[in-house]
Image: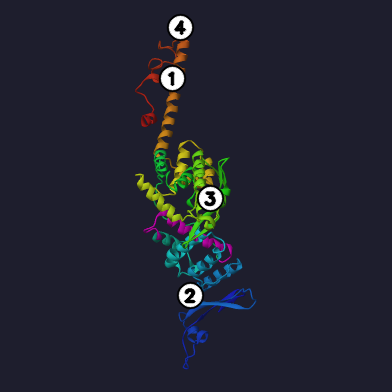
Amino acid sequence: MNGDRRGRVYRRCSCRDRAGKQLGQTCPRLATDGKHGTWYFAVDMPTTAGKRSTMRRGGFPTKAAANRALADIANRTAQGVRVDDRETVATFLARWLQVKAGEAKPTTLRSYRAHVERVIVPAIGHIPIEKLRAEHVEQLLVDAADGRGPVTVRRIHATLRSALSYGVRTRRLPFNVASNVTPPNGARPEVRPWSAAELAAFLRHAETDRLGPLFEVIAACGLRRGEALGLRWSDLDLTNRTARIRQTVVDIGGRLQFSTPKTRSSEATVPLTERAVQALLQVRLGQDLDRQGWGDAYEAHDLVFARENGAPLRPEYVTRRFVALTKAAGLRQVRLHDLRHGAASLMLAAGVPMAIVSKMLRHSSIGITVDTYGHLSEDTARTASDAMAAALEQAFATTAAAAGDHTATTAAAGDAPQTDQTGEPAGQHGGPRGDRTHNPRIKSPLLCQLS
């Protein structure tokens, strides 16, 4: 037996006497047979109630193994980490979801629950939370990638990482085993929003539809679907062409709710184009007629885009209508959210700096903007390439002109050229003057690629 004030280790067996009573530590074979029985440890645990609580664990094959387990428990308690080696990942995540229910937005909580209940718990829910290791998380993400896109896998990883961070924050876990795990590489789906011509064709086709102005505003301002549906007349300043984003419409289990925007940075004022203002004025005229027709039954939510009775529009209905109008217009199918991507793409193509685009889209950091829109569309890339080629051509032309002017000036001076010992003009070993500048066969490889 070995112990100190933090705990002790001992050996016992499962042998029984003639009466059937287990001998435990009193078995005589323990003194003569070093391989008989297994090793255990016992340690007093701190409690909030002040009562004594002893943790006993056994089944260790060697004394050293029992000592290591005891030392691990002692180190955790010394760091103020709560120890409960029987709590599983599933139990821990259920407790975390209860906490998040009072903090997270309804849509975020719904996403967390889906990840936990459909992916994480079926894979690793049985593992004790204190025995969860990075390799468990790595295998979870590899398995999750089968049949799912890289974005979904990254979100599953983010959910687990957030839960384990809560465990570290509350002194339940000593460290986050998911923090340094990288999700499997997957091809990020290429964002191919409509070009300016395609967007114009769609808006022209949809301008007579009841939801045409809604799509006009989303495309012009780069709004998210829920933000556009939550827009109120009190949020608009049509004189100064601005809109304040202060609420969204979300669907939680079939019930529509008003919620705050996605992030704090999402709550901002965005400019409106003149086309968007004209579309909004049309909506106001139509709503005045709706309000008169419905009378007291009209739902006064002050919503800009609403049903005929003033009730919020269902997000999935808006998406279905967008798909139907796209097909009717004969355009390639894109997502409704790609209207937001298209706004960013058109701004970048017009030369708007990335920082301004980030501010317009109300991203929480410019890094998100760069990560999402760092690539350029073919038209934008070609414009940039042509601009670079034109600049180089201009530079070469300027250099050649300068060299020609210098030669002409020297010749006009009428001075006899100085010669060296070879009889050639000084500094003119090789070809005649100006040959390197004007030889058409010598051309920049970069310009060859760009031409």
Residue 168 colored magenta? Answer: yes
Mark nearer the N terminus (1 vs 4): 1
Q: Residue 231: give its label.
A: 3
Q: Amino acid at mark 4?
A: Ala
Separation of marks 1 and 4 at Cα, in angstroms: 24 Å
Residue count near mark 2 (Cα–Cα under 10 Å), binned few <14, some 14–19, many ≥20:
some
Residue 343 colored magenta? Answer: no
Nearer to us of marks 3 and 1 is 3
Separation of marks 3 and 1 at Cα, in angstroms: 59 Å
Residue 236 appears in the rendering: yes
Whether the residues at callouts 3 and 1 have beta carbons within 8 Å, the answer is no
Expressed as whole percent of the image width and height from the top left, the position of residue 273 reads 51, 40
Nearer to us of marks 1 and 4 is 1
Nearer to us of marks 2 and 3 is 3
Image point 47% across, 47% down: which residue?
A: 214
Q: Residue 62: give its label.
A: 2
Image point 37% across, 30% down: which residue?
A: 445
The quarter of the picture where the C terminus appears is top left
**Tag count:** 4
Mark nearer the N terminus (3 vs 1): 3
Secondary structure, magenta segment, majority class: helix
The quarter of the picture where the N terminus appears is bottom right
Separation of marks 2 and 1 at Cα, in angstroms: 85 Å
Where does label 1 land, which residue?
400
Mark nearer the N terminus (2 vs 1): 2
Image point 52% across, 84% down: which residue?
A: 25
Expressed as whole percent of the image width and height from the top left, the position of residue 180 reads 49, 56
Out of 95 and 327, give the one closest to the viewer. 327
Element marked by disc 1: helix
Mark nearer the N terminus (4 vs 2): 2
